[in-house]
């Protein structure tokens, strides 16, 4: 549930996050690397990629009221004896004790009715009051992004209950509701910008970290739909939908300049934006961003990389740099809107992923995006009919430079797609709101290649095309004053798996003015992507054009209750089952890697969250999540924490226009791919903003990992390591100037 506040902050009361699906390992296409791996038993055990299981949905609790009492129910006792636990506990307690002094007694209080007026668009592709949405939706606002100093889309999502991150120095993966396989490319999350799908057509990857193609300063709000969204969005919307809504010329209204410096990564970042509503009514926004980070010189260990399977250790000097360039343009007038996004990112690889040569410079991954959309939306028939139509075009490019036994190798992928969507919404019937939509996408280019650069002309090239068509319908029916239901379904057809039906059912009961109960059911599907199904170089991997698609079924109960006008709690209970998970195995004929339908995954879980606000402007939110993930045949998925805890606190301070945002995040231990455990950890982040130093100037200081906590994330089975060290304390100074 989303709640609005007088200062414009909207805090999700419950966040469902999309979960990631494990897309096959993108770059396991290096022939030299795999051949080398086959000759070494210590590496061969890593070749078959782990069974993939995925995360169920995630929920969140962010709203204009942020509360901590529920968070205090987190499993403190299990780690109360550690030093890591004592520090955050003391910090959180001190914040609580200070709150009475911050709280005002004569400020305007928001009623539940006012809070429920907040609307969302992503759940059904049209505006709905959050209390009437047949889904668990969370909204993250621009004010929240600014208050907490979130540097990436993934960092913002990680603040939500039930969500957690994994970073391998190439990409950031978001796990949800108990699952986030290391090396997963978020293929079971549907990512969109202004409703325009970002997932490419080779890997189906959702870019959520630094690789996300849009500057976070240009984000107006993020709507996160937990659980299956296949009834509306079709392909990839299995574990959730993340729709990023951008700012416009009207919200910028002038020029903006931003500059940032982060240490110890020596990151330099700059942005210039200009937006305005012109005299003729045209809304325009243009923005360009550039970022370069030298990165740190990391001490890295590579088990089994030396002669005879010995361990190699050393400092990866100058091998962690990150370069990113982004451009965004928006032009709109009346019912028309046009968006253009171009992004280019190059990231060095200090961890020598995919068993490349350790401690060897010149190895990197390179991602490029081009996304365009022309959209029309307007009312007809006295407002009873709303028409939305859009045309879109997208391109994605990938290149990996790798070195195997001193031999240079290049893996590339190029994809291109275009299509359109038409949606009709009719609200002329009493107690009914009917929606009908058609979406078509033509994947005109899916090219994958491996090139041994030591031998001119030695290249493996795989070319495929494809298409998908989706027809969807939905009826939002108010049965009685206290009861409503949403019934919907989508029929998708693609040239790989044929026809699939994704139903959706939601029953909503307003038990009292203070209590809302939602019972939700949904299904979604994912067809195998082009890499999983079609890539075949005859050396490392063979194709499997009989590969079946995946399906997920989710049942959920959501209870929202207002304890007071400024304190709301939410309880969520869910179960999801993922069937026919695509996993990387070994072909019995060739002995090479091959993707095939594998294990089933089941997750049972519960999330409790609370949010509280004060008239002074202080906001607090907290959550605790329990998630029990397992393979149906037995066993626990890797990278699956059982407990997650989140605490966020934001308040204005009485000096110099200062604003303080603080976060605490707890992840319990996770299993690595070798069966060992990666320890749980606490992270503390702080962001301090000064708004009155000069007219139009804001200066902020953000510190991530405040207590310099040493922690690790499980590595994928295509890494030399089983666990990867994460960044220690780092600080970013940022200047924002409006003119």
Image: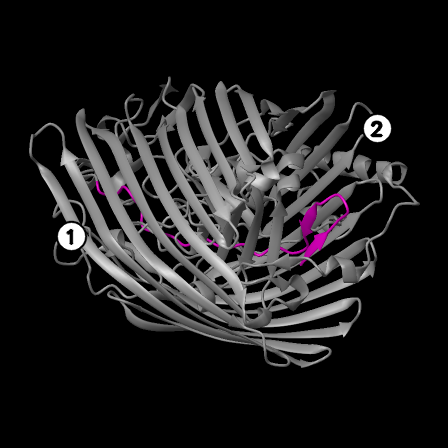
Q: Is residue 234 visible?
A: no
> In the rendered image, which quarter is residue 118 located in?
bottom right
Quadrant the C terminus occupies: top right
Question: Which residue is labeled 1 in the image?
Answer: 591
- Across and down, in percent, residue 491 comes to 38, 73
Q: Residue furthest right?
A: 106
Q: Residue at x 77, y 27 (%)?
A: 657
At a point 50% along the width and 39% down the height, the residue shown is 284
Residue linked to disc 2: 654
Mark 1 or mark 2, which has the lower sequence index? Answer: 1
Q: Residues within 10 Å of mark 1 (few under 14, many from 20)?
A: some
> Secondary structure under badge 1?
loop
Direction front: furthest residue: 280
Q: Which residues are magenta?
A: 1-29
Q: Toward the viewer: 550 or 382?
A: 382
| Viewer-side label of 1, 2 | 2
Magenta: main secondary structure equals loop
The residue that appears at 48% across and 39% down in the rendered structure is 713
Front position in the image: 702 or 195: 195
Observer-nearest of 216 and 649: 216
Residue 333 seen: yes
Mark 2: secondary structure? loop
Asked whether, in this view, residue 394 is left or right of residue 413, the answer is right
* Label 1 to label 2: alpha-carbon separation: 68 Å
Where residue 417 sits in the image (x, y, percent)? 29, 52
Residue 315: image location, x then y, percent = 38, 18
């Amino acid at each position: 549930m989303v709640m609005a506040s007088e200062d414009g902050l909207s805090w999700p009361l419950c966040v469902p996050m999309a979960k990631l699906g494990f897309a096959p390992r993108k770059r396991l296409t290096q022939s030299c690397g795999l051949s080398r791996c086959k000759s070494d038993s210590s590496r061969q055990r890593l070749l078959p990629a782990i069974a993939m299981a995925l995360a169920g949905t995630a929920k969140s609790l962010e709203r204009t009221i942020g509360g901590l009492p529920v968070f205090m129910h987190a499993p403190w006792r299990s780690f109360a004896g550690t030093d890591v636990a004592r520090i955050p506990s003391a910090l959180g307690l001190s914040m609580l004790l200070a709150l009475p002094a911050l709280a005002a007694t004569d400020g305007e209080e928001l009623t539940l009715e006012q809070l429920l007026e907040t609307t969302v668009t992503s759940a059904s592709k049209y505006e709905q009051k959050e209390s009437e949405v047949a889904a668990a939706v969370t909204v993250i606002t621009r004010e929240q992004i600014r208050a907490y100093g979130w540097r990436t889309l993934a960092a913002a999502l990680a603040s939500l209950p039930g969500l957690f991150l994994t970073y391998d120095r190439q990409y950031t993966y978001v796990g949800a509701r108990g699952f986030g396989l290391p090396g997963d490319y978020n293929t079971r999350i549907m990512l969109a910008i202004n409703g325009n799908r970002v997932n490419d057509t080779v890997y189906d990857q959702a870019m959520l970290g630094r690789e996300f193609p849009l500057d976070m300063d240009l984000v107006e709000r993020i709507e996160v739909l937990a659980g299956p969204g296949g009834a509306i969005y079709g392909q990839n919307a299995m574990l959730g939908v993340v729709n990023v809504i951008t700012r416009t010329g009207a919200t910028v209204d002038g020029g903006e300049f931003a500059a940032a410096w982060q240490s110890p990564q020596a990151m330099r970042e700059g942005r210039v934006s200009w937006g305005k509503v012109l005299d003729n009514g045209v809304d325009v926004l243009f923005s360009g961003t550039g970022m370069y980070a030298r990165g740190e010189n990391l001490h890295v260990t590579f088990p089994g990389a030396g002669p005879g399977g010995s361990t190699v250790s050393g400092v990866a000097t100058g091998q962690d740099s990150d370069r990113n360039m982004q451009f965004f343009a928006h032009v709109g007038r009346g019912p028309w809107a046009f968006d253009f996004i171009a992004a280019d990112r190059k990231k060095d690889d200090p961890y020598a992923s995919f068993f490349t040569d350790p401690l060897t410079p010149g190895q990197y991954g390179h991602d490029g995006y081009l996304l365009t959309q022309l959209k029309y939306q307007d009312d007809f028939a006295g407002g009873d009919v709303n028409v939305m139509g859009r045309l879109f075009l997208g391109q994605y490019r990938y290149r990996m430079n790798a070195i195997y036994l001193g031999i240079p190798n290049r893996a590339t992928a190029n994809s291109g797609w275009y299509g359109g969507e038409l949606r009709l919404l009719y609200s002329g019937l009493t107690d009914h709101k009917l929606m009908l939509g058609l979406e078509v996408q033509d994947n005109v280019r899916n090219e994958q290649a491996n090139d041994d650069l030591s031998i001119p002309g030695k290249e493996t090239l795989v070319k495929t095309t494809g298409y998908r068509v989706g027809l969807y319908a939905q009826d939002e029916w108010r049965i009685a004053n206290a009861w409503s239901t949403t019934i919907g379904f989508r029929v998708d057809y693609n040239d790989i798996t044929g026809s699939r039906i994704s139903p959706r059912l939601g029953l909503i009961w307003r038990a009292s003015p203070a209590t809302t109960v939602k019972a939700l059911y949904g299904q979604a599907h994912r067809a195998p992507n082009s890499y999983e199904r079609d890539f075949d170089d005859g050396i490392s991997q063979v194709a499997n054009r009989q590969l079946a698609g995946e399906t997920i079924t989710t049942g959920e109960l959501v209870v929202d209750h207002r304890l007071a006008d400024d304190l709301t709690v939410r309880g969520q209970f869910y179960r999801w089952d993922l069937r026919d998970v695509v996993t990387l195995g070994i072909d019995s004929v060739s002995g090479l890697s091959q993707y095939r339908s594998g294990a089933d995954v089941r997750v049972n879980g519960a999330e409790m969250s609370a949010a509280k606000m004060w008239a002074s402007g202080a906001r607090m939110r907290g959550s605790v999540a329990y998630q029990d993930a397992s393979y149906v045949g037995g066993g626990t998925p890797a990278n699956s924490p059982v407990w997650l805890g989140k605490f966020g606190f934001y308040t204005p301070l009485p000096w110099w226009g200062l604003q303080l945002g603080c976060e605490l995040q707890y992840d319990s231990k996770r299993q690595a791919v070798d069966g060992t455990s990666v320890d749980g950890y606490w992270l503390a982040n702080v962001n301090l903003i000064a708004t009155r130093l000069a007219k139009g100037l804001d200066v902020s200081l953000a510190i991530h990992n405040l207590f310099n906590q040493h922690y690790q994330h499980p590595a994928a089975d295509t890494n030399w390591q089983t666990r990867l060290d994460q960044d220690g304390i780092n600080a970013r100074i940022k200047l924002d100037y409006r003119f």
